[in-house]
Each structure stands twice: as structure tokens, then as C-alpha cells.
Amino acid sequence: VQLQASGGGLVQAGGSLRLSCAAPGSIFSTHIMGWYRQAPGKQRELVADILSGGSTNYADSVKDRFTISRDTAKNTVYLQMDSLKPEDTAVYYCNAIKYALSGDDNYWGQGTLVTVSS
């Protein structure tokens, strides 16, 4: 299973970027879709996720600046990032997970680098 992430790049502080992640339909419709990030020297952390029903969850550090959404017609999840700060600089990873007692079904996309200059 491949998650195809795209949209990273270099942006000045205060700017915006939109990340995209395409997933197979069988995964997209049944898994929680999310974005994580990992800055140099830090652990990977959850940025935001969205359930199939549309409920969302955000890290406190990105609330009111980032918006996660999903397009069921395109099997794609987006992360709209506004008011970017230098501390948002990280490699961003798309994730799809389905929790189960028998073992979680978990997939990662390749990372996409976001660099925010001051």
C-alpha cells in the first residue's frame, strides 16, 4: 500500500502551503487519515488527523492555523497550513491507521519537507 504525499517546499514565515496525500480507496474509506511531522532532533509528532466521518483533531501548536480535510471522490487528504512559523519546519508524513484488537493496520507515506524561513 502506498500513500503518495506531495506539496512541501520552502516558504517565508506567515506564508501558506497545502500538502496532499492520496491513498487507495480501500484504505481511505476505512482508516483514520493523518499528518505527522518530525523536526531535526525531535520525535515524530501528530499534527492533525481526520476520521472517515469528518471529525478532526489537531495538535495545540497548529490549532487555528492548519486545516485538515478529505476529498472522498479523490481519496485524498489535505493539510492546509497557514500563518506558517519557522518552528513548523519539519518533514511531514502522511499516515493511515485503523485500530484493531488483532493488531493495528498502519501505513506511512514518504515524507515531504516543509521549510519555513524567518
Image (spheres, rainbow, N blue to C red):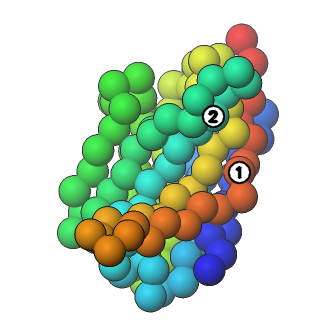
Compared to residue 104, the image places residue 117 above or below, namely above
**Which label sits on residue 70?**
none
Give the CA distance from mark 2 to mark 1.
Answer: 9 Å
Residue at image point 21% right, 69% down: 53
The answer to whether marks 2 and 1 mark residues whose Cβ atoms lie closer than 8 Å is yes
Image quarter (top left, top right, bottom left or bottom right) of the C terminus: top right
Which residue sits at x=52%, y=59%? 95
Q: Residue furthest top?
A: 118
In the rendered image, the vertical position of residue 87 relative to residue 44, given as above or below: above
Residue 69, position in %: x, y? 39, 58
Q: Which mark is residue 38?
A: 2
Three-letter amino acid code at the position of disc 2: Gln
- Residue, far bottom: 26
Which numbered circle lies on residue 111?
Answer: 1
Where, by quadrant of the figure, is residue 59 drawn? top left
Which structural element holds mark 2? strand
Residue count near mark 1 (Cα–Cα under 10 Å), binned few <14, some 14–19, many ≥20: some
Q: Which of the two discs, 2 and 1, labels the residue nearer the N terminus?
A: 2
Q: Which residue occupies the foreground of this view, 80 or 31?
A: 31
Residue 13 visible at all:
no
Give the percent coordinates (x, y) of residue 97: 42, 65
Seen in the picture, residue 2 relative to 113 is either above or below; the reply is: below
How packed is label 2: few (under 14 Cα within 10 Å), some, or many (20 or more)? some
Which of the two residues, 106 or 16, is positioned nearer the viewer here? 106
- Residue type at numbered disc 1: Gly
Q: Secondary structure at mark 1?
A: loop
